[in-house]
Amino acid sequence: MLFGLNHSLKARVMKKKINWNAMLPKHIAIMMDGNGRWATQRGLPRTAGHFAGMKTMKNTIRFCKKNNVEYLTLYAFSTENWKRPRSEVDYIISLINEFVTDDTLDDLNRNNIRINFIGDISRFSLETQNMMNNAAALTKSNTDMIVNFAVNYGGRNEIVHAMKLFLKDGSHELSEEEFERFLYTSECPYPELIIRTSGEKRLSGFLLWQSAMSELWFTDEMWPSFNEYLFYKAIYEFQCRKQYA
Ligand code: IPE
Ligand code: IPE
Ligand code: MG
C-alpha cells in the first residue's frame, strides 16, 4: 500500500503506529552488518560500503537521540574482524579515527551525547587509543544519551575480561550482580532490543551476557540502507511482541 511513497512519509506513518506512552526500549543495540555486500551490489569496493555505513551510523545516532533512546550500543568492529584483509581493516580503523575527531565531538557535545568505547581497545595503535580516550573524556558529563561504540569487541572476550577483574577485586562472592559490575556495559541497563541488518541471524559474539532477555529484530536491508523508517518499524514490532509477552 505504501509503495511509491517517499521515505519520510513512510517513516512518519510508521512512527504514528507506535504507542509512545507504552513500553519503549531504553537501550537499543545494533549490529551494523552488510556494508561490504551493499558496496558489491553496486559494483563498488567494500571500503565504499564502510564509508556509507559511517554516514548511516551518524544519522542513526541523530534519530535515536531525537526519539529519546537513552542508550545506544553500536557494533562497529569485532574481535574476529582482524581476520579480514589488512587494507580493509586499516580503512575501517581510519573511519573510526575520523569519527573521534573534533567535528564529531563537537556534534556529540552539542547534542549532550556521551560516547564510551567497549571492547579491548589495547589492540589499537596508541594514537587511536588516545583519540578514543579523549573522546570519552570530553563527552563524559553529557547526560541525554550514552553511545557505546563496540570496537575490537567480542562477548566471550568481555566475559573473560570481567572475570579477571572480578578475581582481582576479590572482595565479593560470585553472583550475577557482583560479576556484571565488571562488564564493559556496567553503567547501562540490558538492551531490550537488538537489531541486526543484512539478513544474517546470528549474534556473532555481540553482548552475549546482556542479550539474555533481549528481543532480536532482523532486516534484510544492508546497514548503509538502514533508516528512520526501519528504526520505527523495529520499535513498532518490539511493542507488538511485548503486548503478548
Ligand atoms: C559490517 O559490514 C561492518 C563490519 C563488520 C566492520 P560487513 O563488512 O560485515 O559487510 P558484509 O557482511 O561483508 O556485507
Ligand atoms: C558482526 O558482523 C560484527 C559487526 C557488525 C561489526 P560480521 O560481518 O563481522 O559477522 P559475521 O562474520 O557475519 O558473523
Ligand atoms: Mg558482515
Image (cartoon, rainbow, N blue to C red):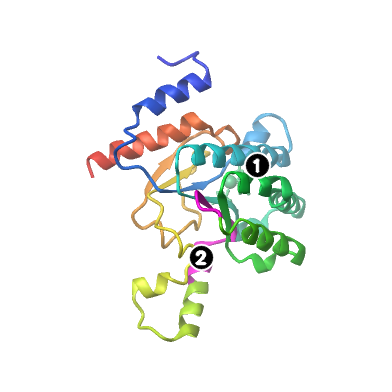
Q: Of callouts 2 and 1, which one flags the residue occurring earlier in the amino acid sequence? A: 1
Expressed as whole percent of the image width and height from the top left, the position of residue 42 reads 68, 29
The amino acid beneath tag 1 is Met
- Label 1: which residue? 54
Q: Is residue 36 visible?
A: no
- Label 2: which residue? 184
Expressed as whole percent of the image width and height from the top left, the position of residue 39 reads 67, 35
Judged from this view, the residue extending furthest toward the left is: 244
Q: Does the residue labelled 2 lie within 8 Å of ligand 2?
A: no
Q: Tell me the residue at 44%/86% (across/down).
A: 170
89 within the magenta span: no
Query: Image check: 211 left or right of 33?
Result: left
- The disc at residue 149 is none
The amino acid beneath tag 2 is Tyr
Which of the pair 160/165 is nearer the observer?
Answer: 165
Magenta part of the protein: which range? 142-159
